[in-house]
Amino acid sequence: MCKSKLYRLLALLVATSLMLAACGGGETAQATEPATGGEGPKVTSSGFVCPEPNPRMEVTSTELNLFVWTEYFPQDMLDCFELVYDIKLNRDEYSSNEEMYAKLSGGGAAYDLAQPTDYIIGLMIRQDLLQELDHSKLPNMKNFDEGWMNKPFDPGNRYTVPYLAGTDAIVVNTDAVENVPQSWADLWKPEYAGRMIALDDSRVLIGAALLILGYDVNTRDPGELEEAKAKLAELIPNIKVFDSDSPKTALIAGDVDLGITWTFEALAAQQENPAIQFIYPTEGAVLWQDNWVLLKDAAHADAAYAWLNYINQGEVFWLTLIDYTYINPNKAALEYAKENQPDIYKAYFDSPITNPPPEAIANGHGIEDVGEATPLYDAIWVEVKGQ
């Protein structure tokens, strides 16, 4: 290289470096920073690139108040909503529908959205706790499988938007239990005394007792319920702990050997210990569906509609398949995962826990609102648990 060309090259490099310094740094340094505000994609602290809202809703509220189940949301889903809409999420949690209902019916709770399970929605409607949804503001309702819409607890989805669904059935550590139960009735055997975990859920436990007796899980007959109370009382010595927050914990730790739990908790326990199996009882599992409802006095309804549309986008809702693998009613999310996250989709599809056999669903029992019989169920639960 000749000297004159070398001098011209050095001058060019100096000029370029001065221009970069004047701009406050090089382009490469800026590109390594996550975009969390202003123009460009929004990125969570985990590195997940947030999809843009589709459609983007007009929102003036700056916060949204959720009253929801524990351990139920991918963090990226929460973070992305805050980032793309610049809305602060405030979240309180509960561990049973009865706890949720007691707080909301007591008044003074300033929540916008809650997450009740199917059977308690009728009661909430009768108590005027909910407002009807404006479906013109919910274009992404189209993403749900029709099998999870228009359910008996809310014909036409006037009040509810599906979230996740599942089954309540038998969980058992097959390394620790010699005689693996196959029916609800098996759980009453004396050999399981003090070895069981059970959901702190009146309708599931009373429902199991009713099924053993050959009755409907939604019976309103006082005589049948009295029989169920006596039957359920016989199960109490077998139950070491009631836990609806994290029943998998006792199973994984080996503090209990078997019991009654739901889809996600069984799968999470099995992932830690493959000997833990989920058994659909011969009398039929309990089927359930959790849903979003807009509360009567919601102060941030515009943000609530934005939330419901955003999380139900397929490219957002698929996140539930990573950490919260229940039965997923969002067909757009499943289609997205199948095309873009095939390993995650296959794990979901191949598991009989998250993708139950058709006969398990056909043989299952949905818990419904029992109207004027609700106090009978509540009284049974209080008396049996307190014995």
Image (tube, rainbow, N blue to C red):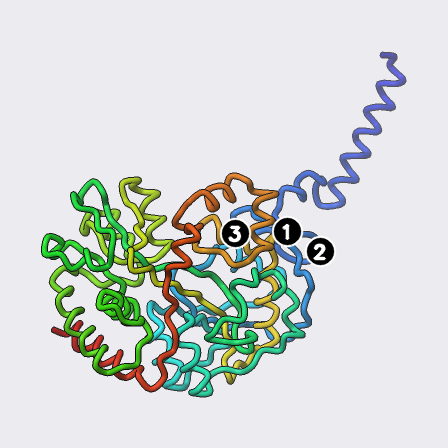
Tell me whether the residue at label 2 lies in contact with that at label 1, contact meaning CB atoms closer than 8 angstroms: yes
Q: CA distance from mark 2 to mark 1?
A: 8 Å
Residue 298 higher or lower than 48, as above or below: below
Q: Which residue is mark 2?
A: 39
Picture residue at 67% right of the left edge, 69% below the top: 57
Relative to 71, 57 lies left or right: right
Q: Earlier in the sequence, mark 2 or mark 3?
A: 2
Q: Judge from the rendering whether residue 93 lies leftward or rightward of residue 47; answer left or right.
A: left
Q: Residue at x 66, y 60 (%)?
A: 53
- Measured in 3D between alpha carbons, the distance from the residue under mark 2 to the one under mark 3, in whole angstroms, is 24 Å
Q: Which residue sits at x=31%, y=42%? A: 272
In the structure shown, which secondary structural element does the residue marked by tag 3 occupy?
loop
Secondary structure under badge 1? Answer: loop
Q: Amino acid at mark 1?
A: Ala
Looking at the picture, tell me which residue is in the foreground, 152 or 119.
152
- Residue named by callout 3: 319
Residue most extreme to the front:
214
Residue 295 locus on image (x, y percent): 50, 80
Q: Position of residue 359 (x, y in %)?
A: 40, 53
Callout 1: few (<14), some (14-19), or many (20+) C-alpha neighbours within 10 Å?
some
Please tell me the numbered disc located at residue 257: none
Could you tell me how far apart the alpha carbons at marks 1 and 3 are, in whole angstroms?
Answer: 20 Å
Label placed on residue 35: 1
